[in-house]
Image (cartoon, rainbow, N blue to C red):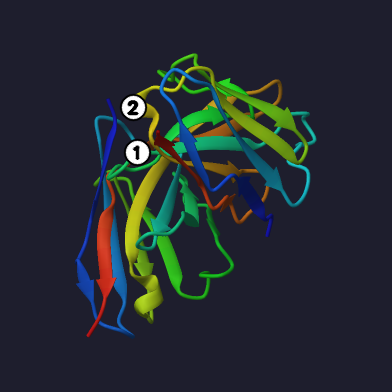
Amino acid sequence: QVQLQESGPGLVKPSETLSLTCTVSGGSISGYYWSWIRQPPGKGLEWIAYIYYSGNTNYNPSLKSRVTISIDMSKNQLSLTLSSVTAADTAVYYCARHTPHPLAAGYYYYMDVWGKGTTVTVSS
Amino acid sequence: DIVMTQSPLSLPVTPGEPASMSCRSGQSLVHSNGHNYLNWFLQKPGQSPQLLIYLGSNRASGVPDRFSGSGSGTDFTLKISRVEAEDVGVYYCMQALQSPRTFGQGTKLEIK
């Protein structure tokens, strides 16, 4: 079955740019939406952004000025960059797939496949 | 942003007993198509979240039928008919009606 694996540097210095990759195995990126979600230590979940396989994106306004997400179909990967990081960006970062559920008109997309997450610490 | 509020924040339950938790949204989650755009997730200790319920009441694939979701508009409930030890963790509701997607703060279910 499809599996997601996040990867990236575990430690990033303040003011630098964080870059993460999510590798999709056992399935295709095509036909799905894909999200990035993060969870600060001991806290709840925060949705960051999603991207459709065609490249359409939607960002959380609270992070929009610093976030870019993209897809590389040839590598079956999606990526996240977050600029000007601070300690507040310390979190576990997850990628997730949105599976389409058919409705009478259109589809509803739900996040049913998640990666195990990758921990990012922002510290000098 | 749509604010999601869950209660209680902590829920101690005896195995075999039922459990119920609430999620309230700051505005109606009913889409123009009549569906409630509300999901429930469970995050077990040390794991990533897993989908339990979507569209307010649809169980995700592989989810035991002891889990059920109900509600409409702004008030939603997740019920577990008979709690098992493997159900411990933090339960999150999430609205999918508007961007940005927003989660509740979570209800932590623990075994008595």
Could you give the CA–CA distance between mark 2 and mark 1, rounded to whole angstroms?
Answer: 8 Å
Label ID, residue A66 = none
Percent x, y for residue B23?
64, 41
Instruction: Single out the residue that lies furthest toward the top.
Output: B65
Mark 2 closeness class: few <14, some 14–19, many ≥20 residues within 10 Å: few
Mark 1 closeness class: few <14, some 14–19, many ≥20 residues within 10 Å: some
Q: Give the vertical position of A5 relative to A1 (above or below).
A: below
Percent x, y for residue B5?
64, 50
Which residue is at 57% across, 25% downward?
A: B79
Q: Give the vertical position of A12 relative to A61 (above or below).
A: below
Chain of residue at mark 2 = B
Q: Give the vertical position of A81 relative to A106 (above or below).
A: below
Which residue is at 38% across, 63% downward?
A: A40
Q: Secondary structure at mark 1?
A: loop
Q: Which residue is mark 2?
A: B86
Percent x, y for residue A94?
35, 51
Q: Which residue is mark 1?
A: B44
Percent x, y for residue A112?
43, 33
Discs 2 and 1 carry the same chain letter: yes
Which residue is at 37% across, 59% downward?
A: A42
- Are dots 2 and 1 in contact, CB under 8 Å? yes
Which kind of residue does numbered mark 1 sit on? Answer: Lys
Q: Quadrant of residue B75?
A: top right
